[in-house]
Image (cartoon, rainbow, N blue to C red):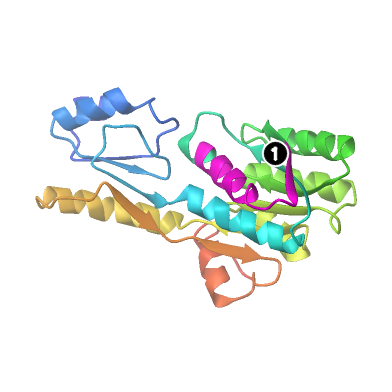
Amino acid sequence: MREAITNKVSGIVLVPYSPSGLVNVSEQAEKAGIPVIATDSNMNAGKKTFIAVDDTVAAEAIARWAETFVHGKGQYAIIDYSLSDTSGIDRRNGFEAAMKKFPGMKFAGIQISNSVVQTALQETTTLLERNPKINVVFGANDRSALGAAEAVQKLHLQNKVCVVGFDADLGEINFIKSGVIKASALQSPYLMGQKAVLALRSVWAGKKLPNYEELPYHIVTYKNYNSPVSIAAIKQYILNYKP
């Protein structure tokens, strides 16, 4: 990013890895007259606008879906992917906040996969072997959900454990089709990039931008994955996807 500032680019679109990691350099860019647009994950400061799905709201929605699926009774575990990434924090907090509203759902633990499928698989396996009362596992991104699904499948628990996720890749979608993953909250990555570029164009035109532009999300499930809305959402992740 510092090289971009040195090269005097016209604008910067970035996905911050942490709330504070790029604040200083983003402020340097803006002082140099270079607009900065943050997408997907937010920063504490140093941006013109933030364009993304509300991770907290989407995670709350997927938690409510899971709670309904298990009829409001059981224990849930979370496989998150980062302790510091804003979106990881928001998804974890949103899922927990929603689950706390249901007295029949008890928290069973959290592990961090660092977006490694094998790590998520091992963590989920350990959680399920130690606690057979767990009937909901939330994978907070595609890598975490994929590892959780592999664990549930290997343990032959797909009819006892509701795996729900966030984001998608072809492996995760295949698990949704087979019913191992019951549902996942999908963002709009194509729209996110498009809106970021349009935001830069607005800045260049002298227009004032809002601090936050919220994008839609869609919950794809093992029942609706073949619907036109779900297919459109999946194709934002997998361009050549064919249902």
Q: Nearer the viewer, residue 6 or 134?
A: 134
Residue at the (75%, 52%) spot, across then down: 104
Residue 226, given in percent of the width and then of the height, sits at 64, 74
Q: Quadrant of the C terminus?
A: bottom right
Is residue 240 visible in the rendered structure shown here?
A: no
Location of mark 1 (residue): 117
Residue 47, given in percent of the width and then of the height, sits at 26, 37
SS of the residue under disc 1: helix
Q: Relative to 118, is 170 on the left or the right?
A: left
The amino acid at mark 1 is Val
Residue 176, given in percent of the width and then of the height, sits at 71, 61
Residue 137 magenta-drawn?
A: no
Q: Quadrant of the N terminus?
A: top left
Q: Residues within 10 Å of mark 1 (few under 14, many from 20)?
A: many
Residue at the (52%, 64%) spot, across then down: 233
User: What segment carries the magenta color?
Assistant: 89-108
The residue sitting at the left extreme is: 206
Examine the image and state in which quarter residue 126 appears.
top right
Residue at the (37%, 55%) spot, across then down: 214
Q: Nearer the viewer, residue 3 or 211?
A: 211
Q: Relative to 113, is 160 on the left or the right?
A: right
The residue sitting at the bottom extreme is: 228
Residue 96 magenta-drawn?
A: yes
Q: How many marks?
A: 1
Residue at the (18%, 40%) spot, across then down: 10
Q: Nearer the viewer, residue 94 or 151?
A: 94
Examine the image and state in which quarter residue 174 appears.
bottom right
Q: Relative to 74, is 195 on the left or the right?
A: left
Residue 172, given in percent of the width and then of the height, sits at 67, 54
Is residue 79 visible in the rendered structure shown here?
A: yes
